[in-house]
Image (tube, rainbow, N blue to C red):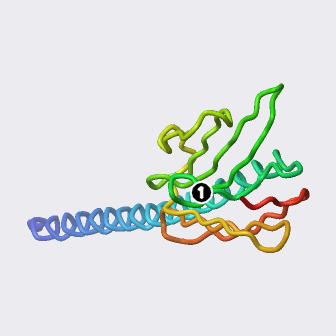
Amino acid sequence: MKRDYKGRHTVDMLFVIALLFLFAMGALMLIALGSSIYRRGVDTLSGNYDRRTAYAYITEKLRQCDKQGNISTDIFNKSGALRIDTIEGDVAYVTYLYEYEGALMELFARADAGNLPPESGQKIMDIQDMEISTKGKNLLQITITLPDEQDLVFIAAKRSEFVPR
């Protein structure tokens, strides 16, 4: 008596192939899910980094130079800017924080340097816009529009008296 295993081997082979295909599809779905979760995490961290960097940089500059009359608002490159006046030795310097071509810029120069072009400043980070206004005697409201078009609004308090220009 001869047994016919030919039909049975085909079914066994199809079962193994289907099992491997199912395993491969599950692995691909797991990789796709993991990459989308990772991408969302990176985007969230990047947004938080932009927010923290813009806020921390400007407030640290203000706290660093907060002396009587050193901090003021000014017009630089036909838009609002923070102006920080300092004296090192016998030389007066000015620092401008402003927005130029989609970037937060800082320009540090001698006060008697004249009109400097806005592109001579150092790029700090990418932003879309920056608005500065005074609120009360010693408060500055700073609104920064980040590259993802979200507004970062914060109020910085000065310990010394604010001098508008």
Direction from residue 132 to residue 92 in the image, left or right: right
- Please provide percent x and percent y for residue 87: 81, 34
- Please provide percent x and percent y for residue 57: 70, 50
Q: Nearer the viewer, residue 123 or 11?
A: 123
- Please provide percent x and percent y for residue 122: 55, 39
Q: Nearer the viewer, residue 56 or 31?
A: 56
Q: Residue at x 27, y 65 (%)?
A: 21
Image quarter (top left, top right, bottom left or bottom right) of the N terminus: bottom left
Q: Residue at x 67, y 54 (%)?
A: 82
Q: Residue at x 74, y 69 (%)?
A: 134
| Badge 1 density bin: few <14, some 14–19, many ≥20, Cα 10 Å | few
Judge whether 31 appears above or below 136 on screen: above
Direction from residue 21 to residue 49 in the image, left or right: right
Q: How many marks?
A: 1
Judge whether 64 appears above or below 40 on screen: above
Q: Residue at x 85, y 50 (%)?
A: 66
Direction from residue 22 to residue 90 in the image, left or right: right
Furthest-top residue in view? Answer: 89
Q: Nearer the viewer, residue 12 or 74?
A: 74
Q: Which residue is mark 1?
A: 75
Direction from residue 54 to residue 13 in the image, left or right: left
- Please provide percent x and percent y for residue 6: 9, 65
Quadrant in which residue 91 is drawn: top right
Badge 1 marks a residue whose secondary structure is: strand
Image quarter (top left, top right, bottom left or bottom right) of the C terminus: bottom right
Q: Nearer the viewer, residue 28 or 128?
A: 128
Judge whether 9 appears above or below 113 on screen: below
